[in-house]
Image: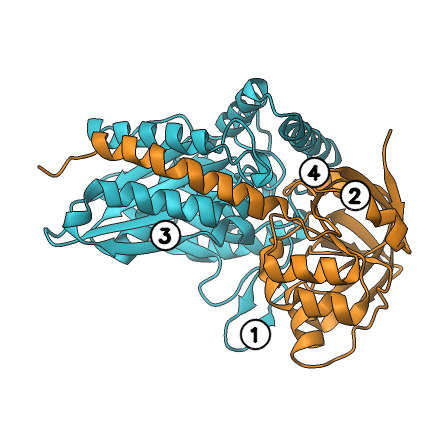
Chain colours: A orange, B cyan
Amino acid sequence: MKKILTTPITDEALADLNVGDIVYLTGHLVTCRDVAHRRLIELKQQLPVDVRGGAIFHAGPIVREKDDGSFEMVSIGPTTSMRMEKFERQFIQETGVKMIIGKGGMGEETAAGCLENNAVHAVFPGGCAVVAATKVEAIEAAEWRDLGMPETLWVNRVKEFGPLIISIDTKGNNIFEENKKTFNERKGAILERIHEKVKFIK
Amino acid sequence: MGNEQSIEHMSDVMSRFTSYIGKRLPTDVKKKQAELRKKEKNPMAIEIYDTMAENQEAADKLDRPSCQDTGVIQYFLKVGAKFPLIGELEEILRAATLGATERGPLRHNAVETFDEKNTGTNTGSNIPWLDWEILPNEDTAEIEVYMAGGGCTLPGHAKVLMPGQGYEGVADFVFDVITSRGVNACPPLLVGVGVSTSVETAARLSKKAILRPVDTSNPNANAALMEELLEEGLNEVGIGPQGLTGDNTVMGVNIESSARHPSTIGVAVSTGCWAHRRGTIIFNADLSYEVISHEGVTL
């Protein structure tokens, strides 16, 4: 059975989730990436959308503006979450956001932020932007449009948005950091074998 | 066709083609992904491969860019010196980018540096990026379109090794880049490696390497062996689709090389994500054309 989270997300809804679990999101999902993070944390500007109990998406979509001024979500996949690592711990603390969706892993600081504030990071499969767009029912608002199409805060109403793979849970476990250890362990022996076969300089 | 009409015609074809490749993957890439899905045993990885396949079907059916990051548009040209529109190509490809941005639609991905303003048109200073090779006695133009997305551009890395580090150092460098930064670049990746004399020559060759079809080999036996060893080795690391572990890491490893200074080994890595949006089209002197990268295309 699909596990579906609904915004506003409660601490209880996240408590049982572990890294590797797959969930879906219904409710509101706000795109928020590089410059929005910088504006909040470094430039001390207030985020124009209240995301307390909500979910943000590291994403810069393709949006079509219709003649009547409304917006159509064309294509919306995740962007590399690691770019926001520098700001995310403080972002979680200040905004009260409960779910951060993106692509690839995030680091120790974000994991600490998730642990301190009962939040999670989840991965939506990168590049699957049309599947994601079909789960957006409507774009309800667009803030900080001066940042251009990718960086605008697009407020999306979504239904069963996913699959979302939990990569950092509320206990602070981080699936990408664990995987990285495994990859690095395997690397040494493989490279030793390759070294023996590429001694082309003789 | 008069000159004006020729320019308009070629701009229109290139605009359609640029938009097309953002929606459908090249035939070799599609085939490779089906192969990797078949070999995969990890359930989470299988779920991701299936979402990828579902996405490509939806993109085709709904006629939308399959990934929202339609990249900075780059054109790699091999143009005969006798191609009639050689002098107009820059203007044509700029018009094609503007056209594709509307038609796709493509995301606005050209930010003027230092002014830090998104131009909103995918054109800007030296963007679309043009890479030229002139073929002295030919009259055709081969154009590779590449959408360089942010995620798979981020791992890009170049370095100059000392000869004592040898090709062993090249292998180390490739593994370091892929295991540290490739993980977030939407694997399974196509890894391009440039082995050359300095950073910029190696970097350019590494990009050329990811424009080669997935299953091709370098004609030099040692280079081909190294491609094979790196591919096998990286797959054994088991990064899997989206870096969440799996039976494979890469679609392939392609190496391009040049001669080098005896004191240096320039090495660079460029990565292509699974959504490897690359397209090849060849124009004849009469502007008739053929698409090489995608089977069954109607523009």
Residue marked by disc 3: B131
Residue B210 found in image quarter: top left
Residue A100 found in image quarter: bottom right
Q: Chain of mark 4?
A: A
Tell me the distance, in whole angstroms, between the alpha carbons under discs 3 and 1: 24 Å
Q: Residues within 10 Å of mark 1 (few under 14, many from 20)?
A: few
- Relative to B296, does residue A179 appear above or below in the rendering? below
Mark 1: which amino acid?
Glu
Percent across and percent down for residue B146 are: 48, 45
Percent across and percent down for residue B35 are: 53, 20
Kindly identify which numbered label has been placed on residue B162: none
Residue marked by disc 1: B116
Most extreme residue toward the top is B38
Q: Are marks 2 and 3 on the same chain?
A: no
Tell me the distance, in whole angstroms, between the alpha carbons under discs 1 and 2: 40 Å
Percent across and percent down for residue A75 are: 72, 47
Tell me the distance, in whole angstroms, between the alpha carbons under discs 3 and 4: 43 Å
Residue at x 48% of width, y 52% of height = B153
Most extreme residue toward the bottom is A44
Residue marked by disc 4: A20
Q: Secondary structure at mark 1?
A: loop
Tell me the distance, in whole angstroms, between the alpha carbons under discs 2 and 4: 9 Å
- Of circles 2 and 3, the one toward us is 2
